[in-house]
Image (cartoon, helix red, strand yellow):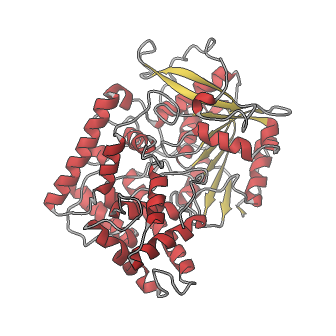
Amino acid sequence: MTPMRRARVPGSMLFTMAVLAGVVAPGANAEPAPIPTPVPVASQQVWGGCAEFDISADALPTAQCTTVSVPVDPAKPGGAQADLAVIRIPATGSRIGPLFVNPGGPGASAVDTVAGMGAGLAGSEISEHFDLIGVDPRGVGHSTPELRCRTDAGFDAWRREPMVDFSPAGVAAIEALYQQFANQCAAQMGTEFLANVGTANAADDLDTVRRILGDEQLNYLGFSYGTQIGTAYLERYGAHVRTMVLDGAIDPAVPPMEETIRQNAAFQTAFNTYAADCARSSDCPLGQDPTQWVSRYQTLVDPLVAAPGRTIDPRGLSHSDAIIGTGNALYSPRYWDFLTSGLLGLQRGADADDLLALADEYQGRNAQGHYTNRQDAFNAVRCADSPVPTDPAAWAAFDQKMRAAAPFLAYGSFTGFAPRDICAFWPVPPTSAPAPVAPEPLGKVLVVSTTRDPATPYQAGVDLARQLQAPLITFDGTQHTVVFNGQQCVDSATVRYFVDSAIPPANLLC
């Protein structure tokens, strides 16, 4: 069973596995900062077709696209420029205003997401009353310069590295790879660009586009990391927000290491839910005994550290790919059959291509072996957004907590050593730090959180709603984000909020 290439559930916050690859989930919101001098916009509103962004006019005949130039360094308006890719699908009826959408990541393309949503929402009240707007943040998606640190061959080689030897020598080898990656990013992009790709920059860029559109206020729908951009925008430009929906929230007050521990605990819950569903079948590769699910999973994937698993693809299945492919499948029950198929392949010594395909889809690799820059952008943005400790002892303690939070992801035993994160080697300092957000007037923002969301845990949404003093919609489910994903209770309340500014009933449970 080979999984088809498919659209991600809106709001893809990239799965993180610090024990495996030294990646820490983004968890910091931009601190309030002085509003930069407005970029001149009078001559920038030139809309055309979207062919340059690979969007078919047949599929979206009314879509318009453009690029907007912004200074890489806001303090140097006449210096190097970044070109932001922008798509607009005009309202079909009585226009209320623009609805900006960001799908998260960081590193996911808002332009591509809006193109997909435009087709899916055709004929709805949203498409009738709002211009759908997607802005690819600087370096992301169709924006230029493209934030890319690795070649395709280099990324393939990266994925072959197990990065699980936490002996002193093994940790040194892993950290050398991280240092090499950081050096490559600095060489490819320059430190000025890397210093200006954080969430605060993304919020400023959104406001530049708002001013280009000529609207005094915008509406905003942010998924996952897109909620972090949303809260940063609220802090800096709250007067220009009419309505805002934040789905799959990141709590901006939580430091990144704690955020990752909580996220991996949520992935363990999703793994348990998947395993329980799998156990209904007599041929489930994890068996029927809940006490054995983790050990049986590790029995299947741990041998891949020494040798790749069998696949039709000549690359084989690496240990890294097995873990990432599993995490990708846990985003939604719709992908569980592919995970089971891949694990059965490992169990039977047969082809495990479904697991490799899940990893490829997550990592952004197409059938021709070319990668998007999503993962490189992910690392650059999160390193710009929050400081991480450089003390090796802090990372050893972190590894111990990670193993307790997500046993299915833990390889081997705790050694007392662990690699520091990539951001500890980053060539530029972070530009913001974790901090709570201030309350907003009732009706300004609405938070949506899913009870068993593996990537952005439910409690983060509860805590963000509390900080903002905003209403919360709870969706009872096992998936990452939910708005405009076919759940009528959530979608109906969201539409009424956007169209009529109607606040949902208190503590609405869907």
Residue 197: quarter of image: top left
Q: Quadrant of the N terminus?
A: bottom right
Residue at (54% x, 74% y) in the render: 273
Residue 276: quarter of image: bottom right
Q: Residue furthest left?
A: 169
The image position of residue 123, as x and y in percent, is 82, 43
The image position of residue 478, as x and y in percent, is 59, 67
The correct choice, above or below, for 249 with respect to 47 in the image is below
Relative side of 502 to 346, left or right: right
Q: Residue furthest right?
A: 94
- Near-viewer residue (239 or 115): 115
Residue at (81% x, 36% y) in the render: 129
How many badges with numbers are in the image? Answer: 0
The correct choice, above or below, for 89 with respect to 284 in the image is above
The correct choice, above or below, for 428 with respect to 480 in the image is above
- Near-viewer residue (315 or 489): 315
The image position of residue 430, as x and y in percent, is 35, 37
- Near-viewer residue (485 or 96): 485
Residue 443 visible (yes or no): no
Q: Quadrant of the C terminus?
A: bottom right
Relative side of 360 to 124, left or right: left
Residue at (32% x, 35% y) in the render: 185
Residue 158 visible (yes or no): yes
The image position of residue 164, as x and y in percent, is 26, 63
